[in-house]
Image (cartoon, grey):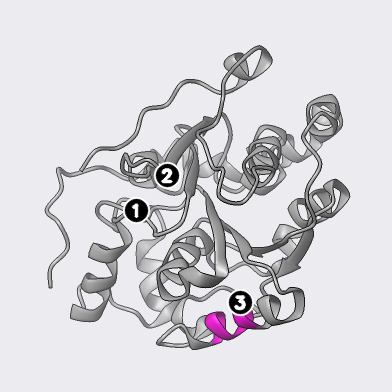
Amino acid sequence: MQAQTHEPIAPPSKLLALTELGRAVFEFGTLPVAAPLLLSAPRGDGHPVMVLPGFTTTDLSTTVLRRYLRQLGYDAHAWELGRNLGPKAIGWEGEKLIARLEAIYAKTGKKVSLVGWSLGGILARQLSRRRPDLVRQVITLGSPFAGDPRATNVWKAYEWMTGQRLKDEDTQRQLHESELAPPVPSTAIFSKYDGIVAWQNCLEPETATTDNIEVAGSHCGLGVNGTVLYAVADRLAQAEGEWKPFERKGLKAILYPSSGHKVH
């Protein structure tokens, strides 16, 4: 099965890519300034949340996000599968990641929300298809789950480090599946200033249980960006079975541009 045909979308500019690290450091440094916003987020209900790191990174990269969620009252979990090298980390059939989800559910007795950064978000969406009975909702951070997978500045490195070829039949099948809305409520958080992946490929299709939230920031700083952290907290705070799109009122109308869905 072949993936959909798309109009060509270029990877982000080299300038954006070269400034990624510096911008991410700046975003981390502005967290104290964002404290009033972060402290105003609704408290969590204690349900489990598993956070999946991005390509080549480990649980260390999601420390700030998980610590913040714990402070709000969530039962935040690392993925505990080492460095995210796609199938090398989760198993070629995703069996290791499925087992991790099942272990958290068995321990807590509650459905698990999944927050995935970049590649971690793609894997989270796939996981929700495999075990929708165990997943409460999915939130992706700069995850290019749609469109041409070569519209990134790291696709060659991905093939080399994971051993997965984008043109392989099985990969093409997964790419086609990835574009479809997950079977659980799903929110895509993205930035038009992303220097790693094309933001156009990070948007959920329009359904009754999907939404897209635009933020200003780098790709590498998504996990330490105050507006991202608040948006994640806002999404997680919704009662199970009562999901609704992100509301942009007051200060949020300024911080979060109104972003439409990507319609397929």
- Lower position in the chain sequence, tag 3 or tag 1: 3
As drawn, is 12 to the left or to the right of 34? left
Q: Residue 258 at what x, y percent from top left?
A: 46, 21
Where 61 sits versus 235, above or below?
below
Q: Which residue is mark 1?
A: 181
Crowd tier of the residue under label 2, counting other residues whose Cα lies within 10 Å: few below 14, some 14–19, many 20 or above: some
- The quarter of the picture where the C terminus appears is top left
Question: Is mark 2 in CB contact (under 8 Å) with mark 1?
Answer: yes
In front of the other: 69 or 110: 110
Front-lying residue, 70 or 156? 70
Part of the protein shown in magenta = 96-102
Crowding near the residue tagged with mark 3, few <14, some 14–19, many ≥20 C-alpha atoms within 10 Å: many
Residue positioned most to the front:
241
Give the left or right position of residue 188, taking residue 145 as reference. right
Residues at badges 3 and 2 in contact (C-beta under 8 Å)?
no
Percent coordinates x, y for residue 59 in the rendering: 71, 68
- Residue 198 horizontal/vertical position (percent): 37, 43
Amino acid type of the residue that numbered disc 1 sits on in the rendered structure = Ala
What is the x, y in percent for residue 238? 64, 42
Point out the tag, 3 or 2, that comes first from the N-terminus. Answer: 3
Query: Which amino acid, mark 2?
Result: Thr
Q: Is residue 98 magenta?
A: yes
At a point 69% along the width and 43% down the height, the residue shown is 237
Label 1: few (<14), some (14–19) or many (≥20) C-alpha neighbours in 10 Å: some
Q: Which residue is mark 2?
A: 209
Number of the front mark, 3 or 2: 2
- 74 lies above or below 235: below
